[in-house]
Image (cartoon, rainbow, N blue to C red):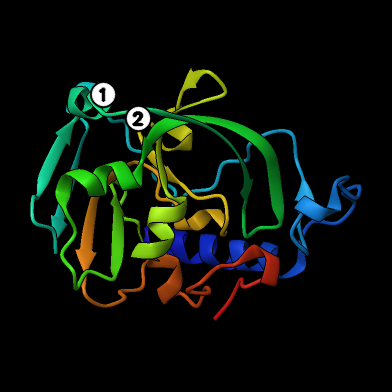
Amino acid sequence: MADFNEKLIQGKERLAKTGRSGVPAATGKDRLPPGQHEVKNWPVLDLGIQPDIPREQWSLTIDGLVGNPRSFTWNDFMALPQAELVRDFHCVTTWSRYDNHWVGVEFKTICDIVKPAPDATHIVCASADGYTTNLPLAVALDDLLLVHSWEGQPLTREHGGPVRGVVSKIYAWKGAKWINAITFLPVDQPGFWEVCGYSNTADPWKEERYS
């Protein structure tokens, strides 16, 4: 598994550095970050593991610096206020997909319930495949959506279902697939790709692919 992950990392870095040749230029360049090209499909990238998590077995644990730690079951999660948002999606491997129709729970809704402590400044999102990624709390409040549906259909296993994180203003690796835990922290804690040398801020408009 370690060898496989190393090959995956090398391949993803190669794509991020060189892009993909032979792709027509996208229209609407004002919404296309530099170095990106538009796709109509939704490519699949992961660490080589796609956990199979039945909805009735899925849960989301919220802990760390919060006044009200919680563990949400699927039914708990679906009982929360639901948001329907249309957002673009930018992958560090140079592709972008416009106008994705997402349905899920906004991270700020979770925060209203768990009550982050005043000294909480960052979060780490963890996945069932062992993946982690970090976000400043302010960025998560502004941009993180915990989605269960895409284009009117339940999120598939290959794309991180039953629930994954989605961010639209930064590169998509900052949204964890198969998300099962969010921890509030007083300091930043780099996640999987950040430790491997990816940018901590991941702004696609500045091409912040690497640190």
The residue most toward the left is 68
Q: Is residue 23 above or below residue 81?
A: below
Residue nearest the viewer, comparing 17 with 182: 182
Left or right: residue 77 versus residue 63 is: right
Q: Quadrant of residue 10?
A: bottom right
Q: Are marks 1 and 2 in contact (CB under 8 Å)?
A: yes
Residue at the image position 34 percent from the left and 56 percent from the top? 131
| Residue marked by disc 1 | 55
Asked whether the viewer can see residue 134, the reply is no
The quarter in which the N terminus is drawn is bottom left
Q: Residues within 10 Å of mark 1 (few under 14, many from 20)?
A: few
Q: Secondary structure at mark 2?
A: loop
Q: Is residue 188 above or below residue 172?
A: below
From the top left corner, tell me how far across and down residue 50 is, in percent.
39, 39
Asked whether the viewer can see residue 163, the reply is yes
| Residue marked by disc 2 | 162
From the top left corner, tell me how far across and down residue 86 is, in percent.
59, 34
Q: Is residue 122 above or below residue 155?
A: below
Q: Secondary structure at mark 1?
A: helix
Left or right: residue 38 versus residue 47 is: right
Residue at the image position 44 percent from the left and 51 percent from the top? 175
Residue nearest the viewer, comparing 51 with 6: 51
From the top left corner, tell me how far across and down residue 67 is, in percent.
8, 56
Q: Earlier in the sequence, mark 1 or mark 2?
A: 1
Left or right: residue 17 versus residue 149 is: right
From the top left corner, tell me how far across and down residue 60 is, in percent.
21, 41
| Cα–Cα span, label 1 and label 2 | 6 Å
Q: Is residue 150 above or below residue 108?
A: above
The quarter in which the C terminus is drawn is bottom right
Q: Residues within 10 Å of mark 2 (few under 14, many from 20)?
A: many
User: What type is the residue that disc 2 sits on?
Assistant: Pro
User: What type is the residue that disc 1 sits on?
Assistant: Arg
